[in-house]
Amino acid sequence: MTTIEDCKLIEIPRIQDRRGNLSVIEGDTIPFNFKRVYYLFDVPSGSKRGGHAHKQQFEFLISLSGSFDVVLKDGKNKRIITLNRPNQGLLIAEGIWRELENFSSGSVCLVLSSGLFDESDYIREYKDFKLLKK
């Protein structure tokens, strides 16, 4: 059974020079090969995203611009992580409930996922998530 302790912040290598910064995700930067990339933007003030868990997929979230909070739950414990640096991401293990909230104006959340979209991999109701974690 996964717990919120299985979720961790990962530094993304950053190359700095007078022209600006460049970060690269390759090789073993993150502990899975990603098959899907998507991003959230123009999230209205006060809105929440996420509100689900995955049975099998891992995800890696990065705040490319602005900031937002990621609320992680494992059925017993809760942890809130603020993402606000484009060279740092949050690894979310399978079996972890996540909610994204407190988006700043202009924020962009990039998500790298270990799997293609598969509705059967989603747990969309928190009560179902709690039952699964028992």
Image: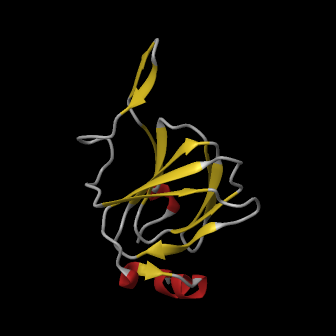
> Can you name the residue that lies furthest to the right here?
46
Classify residue 35 as left or right of residue 126. Answer: left
The image shows residue 20, relative to residue 8, as above or below, that is: above
Q: Measured from the top left, where is residue 43 in percent x and y?
A: 65, 59
**Which is more toward the observer, 129 or 88?**
88
**Which is more toward the observer, 19 or 132?**
19
Q: What sort of colour scheme is used for the picture?
A: secondary structure
The residue located at (28%, 54%) in the rendering is: 32
The image shows residue 123, relative to residue 26, as above or below, that is: below
Instruction: Give the total of numbered labels.
Output: 0
Q: Measured from the top left, where is residue 27 in percent x and y?
A: 23, 41
Classify residue 31 as left or right of residue 19. Answer: left
**Which is more toward the observer, 76 or 106?**
106
The residue located at (41%, 36%) in the rendering is: 12
Give the position of the N terminus as an image quadrant: bottom left
Q: Measured from the top left, where is residue 3 in percent x and y?
A: 48, 64
Q: Measured from the top left, where is residue 126 in percent x and y?
A: 59, 82
The residue located at (34%, 72%) in the rendering is: 56
The residue located at (34%, 35%) in the rendering is: 24
Quadrant for residue 116, please give it.
bottom left
The image shows residue 49, relative to residue 89, as above or below, that is: below
Quadrant for residue 10, please give it.
top left
